[in-house]
Amino acid sequence: MIIIFSAPSGSGKSTLIQHLLDNRQDLELSISATTRAPRGKEQDGREYYFITPERFEELLRQDAFVEWQQVYQGTYYGTLRSEIERIENAGHHVVFDIDVKGGINLKRMFGDKARAIFIAPPSIESLRERLTNRGTDSQDKIEERLAKAEIELADAPLFDTILVNDDLTTAKQNLDKEIKAFIG
Ligand code: ADP
Ligand code: 5GP
């Protein structure tokens, strides 16, 4: 089975995915390739495969990606076919942390085998606050992410479920229920 998570940046998607992975050994995160630089304590092969734009293009030519997007200006992200195989061969369900367009594309590809979950913030203002408090992005990057968030929210109805991450404990409980109903 496949679980797809998409959300405007700062909605709490990573926090909720981490909660799920910490509590369910049958799930495994698909590690994407990206041309952006590692942030903070991120490590190659753990959060992402950090690669050069040249390597990204080479993989594109080899048709190595199931899907890919230029999520931010000049920054590419892609889901490797080899990741899905790796996780399925390990007997695990695949979890995707992917932008909204990528999430919609994967849902179209996988149909009923996939549950597409849109994590929504309670408001744009709370997004601004969370991104500022997270302290990982410059003010420019935060403004870029907020502008994009407004557009992404319009696509939420294309997902199987919209999970509003207001109170974190409640959101985690709702997510656990959702996954249990889908996978068992
Ligand atoms: P995303 O992966 O969607 O960009 P993160 O999981 O990094 O978002 O969350 C953004 C910031 O908001 C983090 O600092 C995180 O600790 C915080 N956060 C997550 N969920 C909540 C919540 N329900 N209430 C308040 N802060 C939250
Ligand atoms: P960040 O730079 O904050 O890690 O990620 C930015 C956005 O890119 C997030 O919304 C994340 O889900 C998305 N993303 C990560 N990997 C992929 C991928 O392989 N494909 C697509 N389409 N988006 C991705």
Image (cartoon, rainbow, N blue to C red):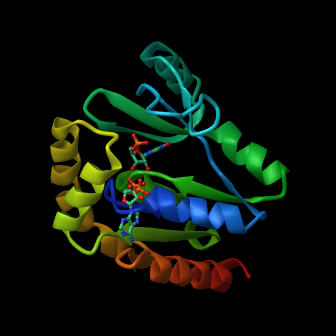
Residue displayed at 55% across by 23% down? 59
Residue displayed at 70% across by 68% down? 23
Q: Position of residue 74 (x, y in %)?
A: 29, 26
Q: Position of residue 80 (x, y in %)?
A: 60, 38
Q: Position of residue 87 (x, y in %)?
A: 75, 49
Q: Is residue 130 above or below residue 168?
A: above
Q: Quadrant of the N terminus?
A: bottom right
Left or right: 166 in relation to 41: left
Residue 85 in sight here? yes
View extreme (top): residue: 54
Residue displayed at 29% across by 58% down? 130
State how many labels appear. 0
The answer to which of 134 and 19 lies nearer the viewer is 134
Q: Position of residue 149 (x, y in %)?
A: 23, 57
Residue 108 in sight here? no
Residue displayed at 25% across by 66% down? 153
The answer to which of 157 and 37 lies nearer the viewer is 37
View extreme (right): residue: 90
Left or right: 82 in relation to 60: right
Q: Quadrant of the C terminus?
A: bottom right
Q: Quadrant of ligand 2?
A: top left
Q: Is residue 87 above or below residue 81?
A: below
Left or right: 1 in relation to 64: right
